[in-house]
Image (cartoon, rainbow, N blue to C red):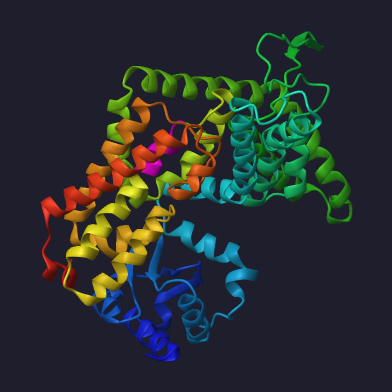
Amino acid sequence: MEHKEIAEKLVKHLGGKGNIVSATHCATRLRLVIEDENEIDQNKIEEIDEVKGAFSSSGQYQIIFGTGLVNKVFQEFAPLVDISGEDHQDKPSNHQDAIKKKMNPFARFARTLSNIFVPIIPAIVAAGMLMGLLGLMNTYNWLDSESGLFIMLDMFSSASFIILPILIGFSAAKEFGANPFLGAVIGGIMTHPDLLNPWGLSDVQPETLDFFGFGVEMLGYQGTVIPVLLTVFVMAKLEKLFRKFVPNVIDLLVTPFLTVIFTGFFALLVIGPLGRLLVEGITNTLDFVYATAGPVAGFLFGGLYSIIVLTGVHHSFHAIEAELLVSVGANYLLPIWAMSNVAQGGATLAVFLKTKNKKTKGIALPAAVSSFLGITEPAIFGVNLKYRRPFIGAAIGGAIGGAYVVLQQVMANGIGLTGIPMFAIAQNPFQYLIGFLLAVVGAFVATLLLGWKEESSKTE
């Protein structure tokens, strides 16, 4: 089918041009915000040969086409709904605003955190991979830890975490509708050299500053996440407040001045200390559950994570994982999520081998490979959830793998990477490999044992 014909059919089956609020696309999927999803003819859309699956999630209706094809379909689709082919790049905020309007408050909160942390993930991944490399060098004595090369690599690996508040400040301010450079300045205040850098320190006590009779600990926030998030949120509110009454003639001078001063005081006197207490509460609770429940917690989280993915709430976990990297020195949640993701691939692989439906077979294999690389939406929505029982089989495999990685205390040096790519940041890759195989094989076998009805693909 020609790309233009596909686009025309999509518009028709989506309820017409007037039912499409906004549209964009990622590497594999067309992402749409729909006015009334009851107007969508799901069966007709899935009958299009080139469509590998369609589902609604996190305020968006998403249609899976695959790499390359989605770009060509979007170029024909966009003019039909009065969107230029470049709008998805030039005006992403419009699409994000439309998505959030379709979400409940909790889902909007998760989406906000996702928008803040996803751009930062490459920096944390790079640091995590460097930490893994340094760990191998140290374990197997590949390089003298006192050598210039080792010291410089160590500097490179810790830099992302030391300036993390600056990165988050910039990204969060952008998401909250404030000046991102002022957000970076607030991050800089919270990591100022005059403040004791807690990164890697445990026994050193900070000095106390007398601020009008109030004692302020001169302790920095290098590597922290929640304190700077809360501070920049307040900063955005203050900046918008000041812009309401500061005359336009002096806005450029006065608004940034007032915003930085007031937010700076809030950061060091109120929000920062409270945020640090909140962080300690969260990490202590997680550590307690991890230490006491152990494999049971891994079993439950590994089995339930895919259900959490359906809600979109999993995006909010990035903030917690980043805090764990700093406070604990490793991320013990990511390996559990990884087991759930690859288990979806194992279940989809079972569907591929057993199904007699040619279209399902064509969707299932690339979807399984995608899951093994950490991208689960094609497997979940294109195959497993459609047939239901494979989704249960994937949950069983994820639970088995999750229990194992917690039992073996498998941890990661970063966030954002699961599946095969996570080997680059896994602290104990051999045990991670065993967990990987257990999750995939467990899901594969469970799916074959549970079975599914082929005809349900047309109605479910």
Nearest to the observer: residue 164 or residue 397: 397
Residue 126 percent location from the top left of the image: 64, 44
Nearest to the observer: residue 261 or residue 181: 181
Nearest to the observer: residue 354 or residue 37: 354
- Write down the region rendered in magenta: 332-339
Residue 369 percent location from the top left of the image: 38, 60
Q: Residue at x 78, y 21 (%)?
A: 195
Q: Residue at x 59, y 26 (%)?
A: 139
The quarter in which the N terminus is drawn is bottom left
Q: What is the count of numbered marks?
A: 0
Q: Is residue 204 visible?
A: yes
Chief SS of the magenta region = helix
Residue 135 sits in quarter: top right
Residue 405 percent location from the top left of the image: 37, 32
The quarter in which the C terminus is drawn is bottom left
Q: Residue at x 33, y 35 (%)?
A: 402
Q: Is residue 109 visible?
A: no
Was residue 334 drawn as part of the magenta stretch in this picture? yes
In-image side of 221 versus 101 (left or right):
right
Measured along the vertical axis of the image, is residue 273 above or below residue 249?
above
Was residue 315 drawn as part of the magenta stretch in this picture? no
Measured along the vertical axis of the image, is residue 316 above or below residue 388?
above
Measured along the vertical axis of the image, is residue 413 above or below residue 416?
above
Residue 6 percent location from the top left of the image: 39, 86
Measured along the vertical axis of the image, is residue 372 above or below residue 317?
below
Residue 413 sits in quarter: top right
Residue 169 sits in quarter: top right
